[in-house]
Image (cartoon, rainbow, N blue to C red):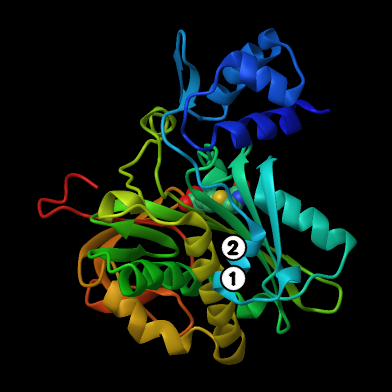
Amino acid sequence: MKIEQRLEQLIKLLSDGEFHSGEALGQAMSVSRAAINQYIEKLDELGIDVFSVSGKGYRLATSIELLNAEDITATSRLPENMLNVSSIVGSTNDDLKQLSDTQQLPQGYAILAEAQTQGRGRRGKQWISPFGTNLYISLYWRLEEGLGRAMGLSLAVGLAIARVLREQLDIEHVAVKWPNDVYINDQKVAGILIDIDSLDDGSARCVIGIGINLTLPETAAQSIDQAWTDVNSHLALPLQRNQFAGRIHQYLVSTLEEYENAGFAQFASLWRQYDKFDNKPVRLLLGERKVDGLCRGVDETGALLVEVDGGVKRFFGGEISVRSADATSY
Ligand code: BTN
């Protein structure tokens, strides 16, 4: 049996958050106690906090609600063949791309994982993906009209997540940052990475990867280099992960259907309601170039509008940040 499968077995046994002796775990898994010690060390590498108390054994810092395809589809009400739940993967985006190379997938097909060892963020950054605590999901979508139609896609996806947080979970101060980050109280809670390529028939294959922090363990969060938060810190009762995953999946599929039918224009006014930068002084970094101006939202294609020297300019890429009043920090 591969080590990943052993670790999955062990996590399942520990997921109830109760103490389990090394001996009992060894027996349940038909391995030695020494092997259990070795696997426990590996759990640490996956960002799972395990307490060890002599005389009592091992227990997880908190119980884990493991992902389960049946429970997710019970909420999403999408067909069962639209979902694949994995345990430990490199990156759900990479897995989904590989899968779509070898078979035809239905629109909105999703891969979810408990942990990613090579989770990818934007601009080559790593996406911290500890086991069993957050949501890592990649969705397949083929845009019939091709790359030209993809411009506002990431904005629509960011808005969908923001709306689930605001409208369904009642969380306040949820905002979107152009082109596609989701914030609560000025701290990042979710990120989106879309891998797009052109297919021979002119359509575009989109692999839409989304990471949402639900409960980010402190140890895992130490390597994040920006202000962050997680959903559960803003709720009275912790989320049920499977139910939340089902809601997100369903909401994304319906948003993507709307997007495919009528483009980004229908979301433009909604963007204004959630826009973190609307009417704020901003700085846009375009490689070496800097543009300072006033953010005027987005146009009907999803391009960023910045007022510079009395005129409004459209931008299609770059990194945006707020300029403070004295324009010295960003
Ligand atoms: C960002 O940098 O803000 C984008 C983060 C995207 C992370 C998600 S998690 C699921 C999917 N798989 C990956 O490897 N990355 C995306």
Question: What is the crowding at mark 1: few (fewer than 14 residues within 10 Å), some, or many (at least 20)?
Answer: some
The residue lying toward the viewer, choosing from 241 and 146, is 241
Q: Is residue 230 left or right of residue 37?
A: left
Q: Which residue, given by chain and number where applicable, does mark 2 sit on?
A: 71
Residue contact between numbered discs 2 and 1, judged by CB atoms under 8 Å: yes
Task: Name the secondary structure under disc 1.
Answer: helix
Q: Quadrant of the N terminus?
A: top right
Residue at figure coordinates x 39%, y 84% from the top left: 268
Q: Is residue 247 positioned above or below 311 on the image?
A: above
Q: Is residue 328 left or right of residue 306?
A: left
Task: Name the secondary structure under disc 2.
Answer: helix
Q: Is residue 160 positioned above or below 215 on the image?
A: below
Q: Is residue 67 visible?
A: yes
The residue lying toward the viewer, choosing from 240 and 329, is 240
Q: Residue 84, percent across and down?
A: 71, 58
Q: Quadrant of residue 300?
A: bottom left
Q: Is residue 306 visible?
A: no
Q: Which residue, given by chain and number where applicable, does mark 1 sit on?
A: 74
Q: Is residue 215 left or right of residue 41?
A: left
Residue at figure coordinates x 60%, y 75% from the top left: 150
User: Please, what is the three-letter code of the amino acid marked with disc 2?
Assistant: Asp
Q: Residue 118, percent across and down?
A: 63, 38
Q: Residue 6, percent across and down?
A: 73, 28
Mark 2–mark 1 distance (CA, rounded to whole Å): 5 Å
